[in-house]
Image: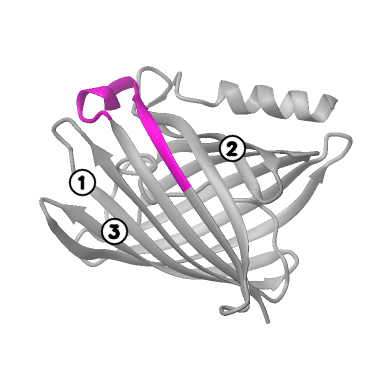
Amino acid sequence: MRGMGIFLAVLILGLPTVATAEPGLAGTVYSPRSEKGVSEFEVRSGRLVGGPADGRGATVIEYERGVSDALRVSAFAEVEHEAGRSKVGALGLEGVFTLGQVPGLGIDLGGYLALEQSLQGEGGVVEAKALFAKRAGPFEGRLNLIAERSVSRATDFEFGYAAQATVEVVDDVELGLQAFGDLGDSHGLGGRRRGYLGPILQIEAGSRALGGELEFQVGYLFPVGTARADTDGQFRLGVELERKF
């Protein structure tokens, strides 16, 4: 319980009182855990609702494979939605590796590294994340601390976060909160920045036809900080098929 209390404090302090171009949208909060032989096919989508940015969104289509109990790798494509039109904006590769657990606290540690190449002439981006996760009974909390930088031109590092806390209320049904936001760049951290925070619902169900387990996630995140000027929020939907070979 002491470890869960410390983890919750870190999680809350990391939220948008303080990255991507728009936090959230088709993003996810990564777990540092991996399982050998497990494959996942996932589609995540987010769309801004209301305000000047109404209708702008993104969809990520991703295939992931657990190479070992310490490493999983994936390939993904990102589709951009704007002004009633959709186009494939980028392709990328990513890896997640397990680093172990904080002794006495039960907090799992991991790392993330991705390379994304724009198909719209914007060059490439490298992104790194520090991953933290804590389980305690029906509770699970995750925190990702993010740094990204263009590899095509000289730019600042940009920093952000993604966080999630869920509780299993009945078998295979979880309720929780999710948050995404900016933390700053190489010139400074903190201050009033863009962020989103809101409720999510996750449901898992076995599928004999597909030979695996389906997970559905739906949520609505409210804008925080400077994001309030552009939108009333973002609607998020994700579907994932997990199968062990």
Q: Is residue 35 above or below residue 220?
A: below
Kind of residue at badge 2: Leu
Q: Amino acid at mark 3?
A: Ser
The numbered dot on residue 203 is none
Q: Which residue is mark 1?
A: 56
**Is 97 on the left-hand or right-hand side of 164?**
right
Closest to the observer, 178 or 89:
178
Q: Residues within 10 Å of mark 3 (few under 14, many from 20)?
A: few
Residue type highlighted by circle 1: Arg
Q: Residue at x 66, y 59 (%)?
A: 97
* Residue position marked by numbered label 3 in the rendering: 152
The magenta span reads: 218-232
Please name the colour scheme applied to the rendered image: one colour
Q: Which residue is mark 2?
A: 175
Query: Is residue 186 visible in this depiction of the protein?
Result: no
Secondary structure of the residue carrying tag 2 is strand
For the point 13% across and 33% down, which residue is it? 52
Q: In which image quadrant can residue 141 be found?
A: top right
Q: Left or right: 103 with respect to 185?
A: right
Q: Earlier in the sequence, mark 1 or mark 3?
A: 1
Measure how far apart labels 1 and 3 are at the Cα level.
25 Å
**Comes first in the chain, label 1 or label 2:** 1
Give the vertical position of 88 relative to 122 (above or below): below
Q: Position of residue 123 (x, y in %)?
A: 26, 61
Classify residue 51 as left or right of residue 145. left
**Gap in angstroms between the C-alphas marked 3 and 2:** 40 Å
Q: Residue at x 84, y 24 (%)?
A: 2
